[in-house]
Image (spheres, helix red, strand yellow):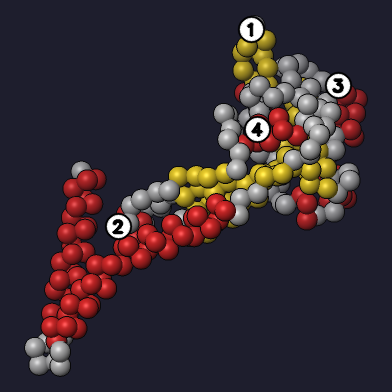
Amino acid sequence: MIGIFFIGVYALFILVAVFLPFLIFRKRAKNYKKKRTILSLIIISIPFFVYAFERTLYEWECSNNILFYPENKLDRPLSIAYSGHISKGSRAYRKSNGKNLLNVFHDFSFEYIVSIDGEENFKLINKEKIIEPLMNSEVFPYELRDITNHERENVLNSTKYIVYDSVEYKFNMILITIYIYDFKNDKVISAVSRVSHSKGQDIINILYHYEFGRCSKIEAKYGPVEELLSKTFK
């Protein structure tokens, strides 16, 4: 059904390219045949110009992808804050070898992960504004168990790294940059970016239905966050 719709849309597009010049340039117009031909070619070439523009922009953004991390891996901290989605309570855990283990970052684990709320760019706000949401965050131990308030407080006070991302939308692209930020020293220690190109569902994107996929300077088995963590920490 979708294929028939696409064929119908393109057939209509060709009909417009053929008949619209006839409606605009009548026989009494000077050089009407030449003008009709030029206008038809312009209309027919519109999809190619759109494709070329988006492809050029996509390749340009891909060439500007970033990837950096410490030359020497840092000691893995006991805890790290993460602004991404973590399911609440026991739903954040999975069964593995008879144990309920935290299902975040796949096989790259920390003793604790702090689920910090907020979609802000933590690098652009001061330390004081980070402390409040951090101290109100939920703490997940690697293995499902209850933790005391004292243990939670110690974890939050010792946490210094935040994993967060920034998202930018440009035409049919999503530009995502993932950061590991040492907020106590006000320093981004690692970052990787990725460009994803996909078409939406409006009429223009249905008419020009193509996708370029995604590009990044990092090849990740599970995801760019896990790969960046493994390149940053021992």
Percent coordinates x, y for residue 9 in the rendering? 22, 57
Residue count near mark 2 (Cα–Cα under 10 Å), binned few <14, some 14–19, many ≥20: some
> Which callout, 1 or 3, points to the residue nearer the camera?
1
Q: Quadrant of the C terminus?
A: top right
Q: Which mark is residue 148?
A: 3
Residue count near mark 3 (Cα–Cα under 10 Å), binned few <14, some 14–19, many ≥20: few
Task: Choose the circle earlier in sequence order: 2 or 4.
Answer: 2
Task: Choose the circle earlier in sequence order: 2 or 1.
Answer: 1
> Which callout, 2 or 3, points to the residue nearer the camera?
2
Q: Residue type at mark 1?
A: Asn
Could you tell whether 144 is left or right of 35 in the image? right
Q: Which residue is mark 4?
A: 227
Task: Choose the circle earlier in sequence order: 1 or 3.
Answer: 1
Q: Residue type at mark 3?
A: Thr
Q: Secondary structure at mark 4?
A: helix
Q: Which residue corresponds to the image point at 17% horizontal and 80% vertical from the top-left?
A: 36
Q: Which residue is mark 2?
A: 207
Percent coordinates x, y for residue 174 in the rendering? 53, 51
Q: Residue type at mark 2?
A: Leu
Q: Residue type at mark 4?
A: Glu
Q: Which mark is residue 97?
A: 1
Q: Nearer the viewer, residue 16 or 33?
A: 33
> Which callout, 3 or 4, points to the residue nearer the camera?
4
